[in-house]
Image: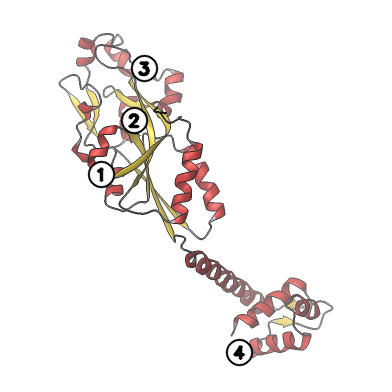
Amino acid sequence: MTLDQLNALHAVVERQSMQLAAQSLHKTQPAISIAIKKLETEVGFEILQRDQYRVTLTERGEELYQAAKDVLNAHKYMYKLSEHLAIGNEAVIKIAYDAACYTLPFFTALRQIQQKYPQTQMQIFGEYRLHVFDRLREGKIDLAIAPWSPMFMSYGNFETFAYSNFKLVPMVSRRLIEDLGYPPKTKTDLEKIPMLVPEKLAFNIRPEQFFSITGRQRVKVNDSLTQKNLLMAGLGWGLLPEFMAKHELETGELVEISIPEAVVKIHGEIHIVRNRDVPLGPVAQEIWELFRQQSTIQPDIKI
């Protein structure tokens, strides 16, 4: 069984004619007939019915034809993949994002790359508490998408640019306010309520390096979704990415806290980050440049 035989079968079935199949493959009709006959001899049964005006498949021929199409498609893919890899394009691109990021713009941009380079597989990883940087430092991913602080430069040989903004909003559930009988309006009020805080950040950074930790009682969580569910259940107050709680803030299920002397909304930037010690391949470099072009933040201009 050869690819030439399978191609001949495919052409005959698609065009329902030996003559038209021969024309499409730039071969003679006898050559196509011989290829089909040899294939039938090898499999041990008739594949085509020839007693009709148009050539059709037998019942067993139909099953064989479906398998033949799979083989031909796999061969076509392997051929394109070999061309893709031969010019230096990556077989796999690995990208990790932090849960604090609103990812739809990034994923929409990646769709362009997926359509342009279908032979490059994309692996996308979601991380919490800035652990995308652990993956990046260890060379396990090509690019990271995460909240950024200049202090991170001391933890790795990173190259980065700002892509968009993010907000962490301090909030509490309406349920907890009703249980308390009042909304927290002072630092003292807030200290009486358990605070939901990240269990551990990357680089062994303490959460209080980014925001004030109030109160004696704390509930440690390891991901944003759990933190949101704990907030909704009234187990305490905490900071969540604004996009993650937008609906609940609009409906009043969650209520923003604003106590300037204790806690305020945190504004920051989402950056695209790469490890300078690990060169990017052609496809990853194109993703890097695409994200840079789509950045909604203008770079600082220093004179």
User: Which residue in the protein does label 2 denote?
Assistant: 229
Q: Nearer the viewer, residue 261 or 56?
A: 261
Q: Viewed as shown, does residue 292 lie left or right of 255?
A: right
User: Which residue in the protein does label 1 denote?
Assistant: 156
Contact between labelled residues 2 and 3, with CB atoms less than 8 Å apart: no
Q: Nearer the viewer, residue 220 or 158?
A: 158
Contact between labelled residues 3 and 4, with CB atoms less than 8 Å apart: no
User: Which residue in the protein does label 4 denote?
Assistant: 42
* Mark 3 or mark 2, whichever is nearer to me: 3
Q: Under tag 4, what secondary structure?
A: helix
Q: Residues within 10 Å of mark 3 (few under 14, many from 20)?
A: some
Q: Amino acid at mark 4?
A: Glu
User: Which residue in the protein does label 3 denote?
Assistant: 256
Task: Answer with mark 4 or mark 2, whichever residue precedes in sequence.
Answer: 4
Q: Nearer the viewer, residue 4 or 221?
A: 4
* Residue located at (69% from left, 85% from top): 36
